[in-house]
Image (tube, rainbow, N blue to C red):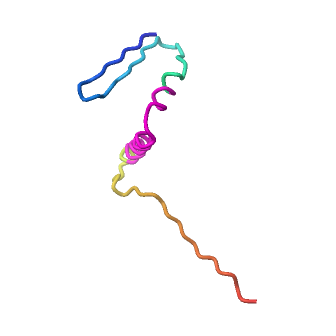
Amino acid sequence: MRETIETFKDGRTITTRLSRFGERPDREFDIQFWQGLTSKERADAGWELVTAYWEMKGKNPDELRLQRSAESIQRGRR
């Protein structure tokens, strides 16, 4: 398994891990990556996946929003 780390002038870092076909690397690589992000960066990555999926389905990502459900329950008179 070979790992390379490339750092750019703008501060971005790309880490690549190359393994042989059929070789199952441990998950430590992924865990370190996700734990190294802020909660906002993780949320942004998740939202990016949601919008990419929505676009693959041929829908406009501008239609996406958080669902807000509201109900009113009133007790009947006795």
Q: Which residue occupies the foreground of this view, 8 or 64?
A: 8
Q: Residue at x 41, y 41 (%)?
A: 49
Q: Residue at x 54, y 23 (%)?
A: 27
Is residue 49 shown above or below 26? below
Residue 33 magenta-highlighted: yes
70 to the left or right of 63: right
Residue 73 x/y as whole percent: 63, 77
Q: Is residue 52 above or below residue 29?
A: below
The residue most toward the left is: 9
Residue range highlighted in magenta? 31-54
- On the image, the x and y values in percent for residue 1 come to 46, 10
- Above or below, 68 against 22 in this view is below
Question: Could you say which quadrant of the image residue 39 lies in?
Answer: top left
Quarter residue 48 falls in: top left
Q: Is residue 57 left or right of residue 31?
A: left
> Which secondary structure class fits the magenta region best?
helix
Is 69 above or below relative to 41? below
The quadrant holding residue 8 is top left
At which x and y percent is residue 37? 43, 34
Q: Is residue 53 left or right of residue 7?
A: right
The total number of labels drawn is 0
